[in-house]
Image (tube, grey):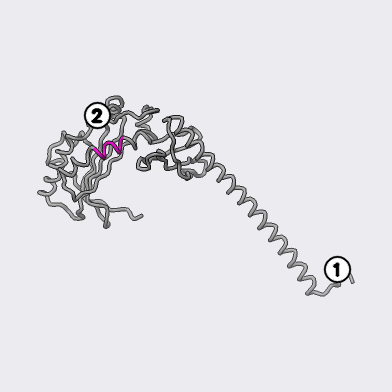
């Protein structure tokens, strides 16, 4: 019996087998390709993690723990970079970001050390000025921006005051004070807040590029307060500062 004389059900089964075989081959090929890309990416992650760890050890002469890096910033015709959270092996509280790209590795370790130093120094000051019903956060940067490009710290991180004397305005210094309130403030309350900020301003490092954010606590859909540089806070009239208070939406995450 010729092929053309085979029963129709038999031919249909053979056709279905060929289609199924083709589909299976395609699935296997796709799985292999995807698996190859996955393995390649995991090798790149491992390589970035190792290079970050070696970089930090060589730069600061101590051991660091580097968590698993994440790939960020990549897109069409745009090169991305690996970011990872790291901390000294003997102090998990000093957490900072390490970034690895084709141009090299950079880190925010010095800024994290300075942030911890300033947080300890300012805690009693803020509690005295605002009372215990506030939250506050300090963020001092030492790298990964155009502003900090000339800051080069290696070996033992200098004390913050010594770094300020050397680098001055190249150091971004951010202080956020959040009071446990989520409402509009009266003019009298705004003036009282400005008075507190002015007292606090005398305790902040004027030589840095310092910015103060005063706002309600981070809950609800609105915050109320102001963002002002330390320089403006010290030089503007109190009425002008009061007029800078505003309400802004909390972006949902």
Q: Position of residue 136 (x, y in %)?
A: 24, 45
Q: Position of residue 37 (x, y in %)?
A: 59, 47
Going 50% across and 44% down the picture, which residue do you hit? 75
Q: Which residue is mark 1?
A: 3
**Does 49 appear above or below 249?**
above
Dot label at residue 123: none
**Does 154 appear above or below 44?**
above
- Position of 41 with respect to 191 (left or right) is right
Stretch of the chain drawn in magenta: 114-120
In which quadrant will I find the N terminus?
Answer: bottom right
**Does 160 appear above or below 17?**
above
- Given residues 223 and 160, the one toward you in this image is 160
Q: Which residue is mark 2?
A: 207
Going 16% across and 41% down the picture, which residue do you hit? 197
Q: Secondary structure at mark 1?
A: helix
- Count of marks overlaid on the render: 2
- Position of 134 with respect to 38 (left or right) is left
| Callout in the foreground (2, 1) | 2
Is 116 colored magenta in this rendering? yes
Q: Secondary structure at mark 2?
A: loop
Going 35% across and 31% down the picture, which residue do you hit? 148
């Amino acid at each position: 019996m010729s092929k053309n004389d085979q029963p129709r059900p038999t031919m249909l089964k053979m056709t279905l087998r060929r289609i199924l075989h083709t589909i299976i081959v395609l699935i296997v090929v796709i799985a292999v390709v995807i698996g190859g890309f996955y393995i390649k990416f995991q090798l790149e992650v491992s390589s970035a993690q190792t290079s970050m760890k070696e970089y930090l050890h060589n730069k600061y002469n101590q051991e660091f723990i580097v968590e698993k890096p994440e790939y960020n910033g990549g897109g069409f015709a745009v090169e991305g970079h690996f970011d990872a959270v790291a901390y000294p092996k003997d102090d998990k509280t000093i957490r900072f970001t390490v970034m690895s790209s084709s141009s090299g590795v950079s880190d925010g370790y010095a800024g994290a050390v300075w942030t911890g130093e300033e947080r300890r120094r300012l805690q009693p000051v803020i509690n005295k000025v605002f009372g215990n019903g506030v939250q506050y956060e300090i963020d001092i940067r030492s790298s990964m921006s155009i502003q900090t490009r000339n800051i080069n710290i290696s070996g033992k991180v200098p004390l913050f005051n010594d770094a300020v004397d050397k680098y001055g305005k190249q150091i971004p210094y951010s202080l956020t004070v959040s009071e446990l309130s989520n409402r509009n403030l009266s003019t009298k309350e705004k003036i009282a807040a400005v008075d507190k900020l002015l007292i606090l301003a005398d305790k902040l490092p004027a030589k840095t590029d310092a910015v103060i954010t005063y706002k309600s606590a981070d809950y609800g859909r609105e915050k109320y307060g102001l963002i002002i540089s330390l320089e403006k806070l010290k030089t503007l009239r109190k009425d002008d500062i009061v007029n800078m208070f505003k309400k802004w939406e909390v972006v949902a995450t």
